[in-house]
Amino acid sequence: DTGVSQDPRHKITKRGQNVTFRCDPISEHNRLYWYRQTLGQGPEFLTYFQNEAQLEKSRLLSDRFSAERPKGSFSTLEIQRTEQGDSAMYLCASSALQGYEQYFGPGTRLTVT
Amino acid sequence: GNSVTQMEGPVTLSEEAFLTINCTYTATGYPSLFWYVQYPGEGLQLLLKATKADDKGSNKGFEATYRKETTSFHLEKGSVQVSDSAVYFCASPGTGGFKTIFGAGTRLFVKA
């Protein structure tokens, strides 16, 4: 078990471009979560999946954001028409069906110029 | 909904000093409570947890006791090391139970 992985680790993009991030959870974990963390703040929940079903989305997740987990394994988070306010660390976590412990990946740091 | 509030940092201590980072929660019922740690350049790691009132979570010399009377889950360590320098987050499941609600984080600096 190699833990949760995220790719890329860093992304610099120009305002208005689209970006896509990938998360590979711990293999036996059914639940997958996306969070956003800005400097000096705790992570804020964006969305979560149980298997391939997206069960909850935060109001933080505007229409420009979309997440998928097509086969219940890896997940992607796409941001369309990026804005400077999207600059943040995007964290992925996974958990088993039992319990609330979440295991986090290293994050993808997005910088929008 | 559920929320957690933790003391602001940064906290600067000398090696071997005693550490307390305060955390209080607001919740319906008695949710599980967690402390996560984020070392520089790394993702969050679960440090310890408590699943019910009066439980004590412990790991790596850190302890926290779930106190429902004061709705608190303060993090303590008797003797900090330079390697403990990190950001510490208090956390709890959100309403509905699956997402996690985090405090703003407390940055700890430990000087040799």
Image (spheres, rainbow, N blue to C red):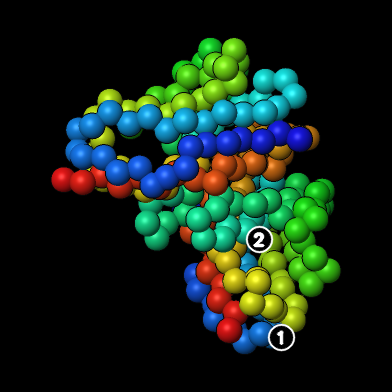
Which residue does the image show at 30% across and 47% down from the upper left?
B109
Q: Is residue A26 left or right of residue B79?
A: right
**Position of the C terminus of chain B by quadrant:** top left
Q: Secondary structure at mark 1?
A: loop
Mark 1: which amino acid? Gly
Mark yes or no: residue B53 visible: no
Q: Which of the two discs, 2 and 1, labels the residue nearer the N terminus?
A: 1
Chain ID, mark 1 = A
Looking at the image, can residue B27 be seen?
A: yes
Residue A74: mark:
2
Residue visible at 51% across and 60% down in the picture: A39
Question: Picture coordinates of residue B78 (x, y %)?
Answer: 28, 25
Along the line of sight, the residue nearer the viewer: B102 or B56 = B102
| Marker disc for residue A16 | 1
Image position of A4 with respect to B47: above or below: below
Observer-nearest residue: B42 or B8? B8
**Crowd rating for badge 2 (residues with CA inside 10 Å; few <14, some 14–19, many 20+):** many
Residue A48 drawn at (x, y percent): 73, 51
Question: Closer to us: mark 2 or mark 1?
Answer: 1
Amino acid beneath label 2: Phe
Q: Decide: marks 2, 1 in contact (CB < 8 A)?
A: no
Compared across the picture, whether B80 is left or right of B41 comes to: left
Instruction: Determine whether B15 is above or below B69 in the image.
Output: below
Question: Label 2: chain?
Answer: A
Quarter of the figure that contains the N terminus of chain B: top right
Q: Is residue A109 above or below residue A53?
A: below
